[in-house]
Amino acid sequence: MASGKALLFDIDGTLTDTDALHLEAFNAVLGRYGHAFDHARFTKELQGFSNASIGERFLPGEPAARQAAIIGEKEKTFRKLVAGRIQPLPGLMALLARADRANVPLVAVTNAPRPNAEMLLSGLGIVKRFRALVIGDELAHGKPHPMPYLEGLRAVGAAARTSVAFEDSRSGVRSASSAGIATIGMRTGLSHDDMIAAGAAMTAKTFDDPALLDFVAAAMDW
């Protein structure tokens, strides 16, 4: 049985605060199909969900291939918006450096398409620091199903009970926590209460929050 430790991170809204740009891209593309999203609706109906499920929900009259093409257009719009604007959440780089020194593997777990994930990790300059990149839409089930996080653990031989996940969405918190991983909710878009209700063990605004650092240090035995 796997017994290793790992730190597992969502990407959008967790490593870097991109939610406002996703919201803009969704409105630009899905607005043509009669949909309009404010921040509250975005966090409940779009944030953290797989593109396949978003297409099925908001473009039910379109064939699957057309749904994928429309959502793909949204992602291209997002990539144009975010280019040159990718910044890490405060404290992220120091936390990753601490994990590297302790030889704790880093895993990225996202429902974003692979081009988005690779662009954001590259923009942050941290692609090579992650030992695995798990894409929800490439699995049988994306978030909020636990499969993406279970796959992340499997990829590095880690155990849920000795690992920590970082998430910013309800679906992501549910995915990680239902995989048995203690999950820290990053408050880039949701409130403390929202994420605790979804299953987070604690929440923080940034990665240099002393409570977050204490939580991770205890879990990793640093």
Image (tube, grey):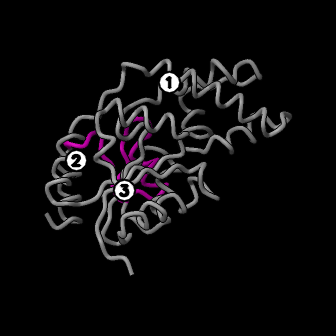
Q: From the image, tell me which residue sits under label 3.
A: 165
Which residue type does callout 1 highlight?
Answer: Arg
- Taking the image as shown, residue 32 lies to the left or right of residue 86, namely right
Mark 2 and mark 1: Cα distance apart in space = 25 Å
> How busy is the neighbourhood of tag 1: few (under 14 within 10 Å), some, or many (20 plus)?
some
Which segment is the magenta one? Answer: 183-208
Which residue type does callout 3 highlight?
Answer: Ala
Give the image location of residue 89, x and y in percent: 29, 35
Which residue type does callout 2 highlight?
Answer: Leu
In front of the other: 210 or 56: 56
Mark 3 and mark 1: Cα distance apart in space = 25 Å
Residue 90 found in image quarter: top left
Give the image location of residue 180, x and y in percent: 43, 69
Helix, strand or loop for disc 3: strand
Which mark lies nearer to you, 3 or 2?
Answer: 2
Mark seen at residue 79: 1
Residue lying at 44% horizontally and 40% vertically, measured from the top left: 190
Q: Is residue 204 above or below residue 189?
A: below
Helix, strand or loop for disc 2: helix
Q: First in sequence, mark 3 or 1: give its number.
A: 1
Whether residue 29 is in magenta: the answer is: no
Q: First in sequence, mark 2 or 1: give its number.
A: 1
Q: From the image, tell me which residue sits under label 2.
A: 96
Q: Quadrant of the N terminus?
A: bottom left
- Taking the image as shown, residue 21 lies to the left or right of residue 140, namely left
User: Mark 2 touching mark 1, by CB under 8 A?
Assistant: no
Give the image location of residue 64, x and y in percent: 79, 40
> How busy is the neighbourhood of tag 2: few (under 14 within 10 Å), some, or many (20 plus)?
some
- Taking the image as shown, residue 16 lies to the left or right of residue 40, namely left
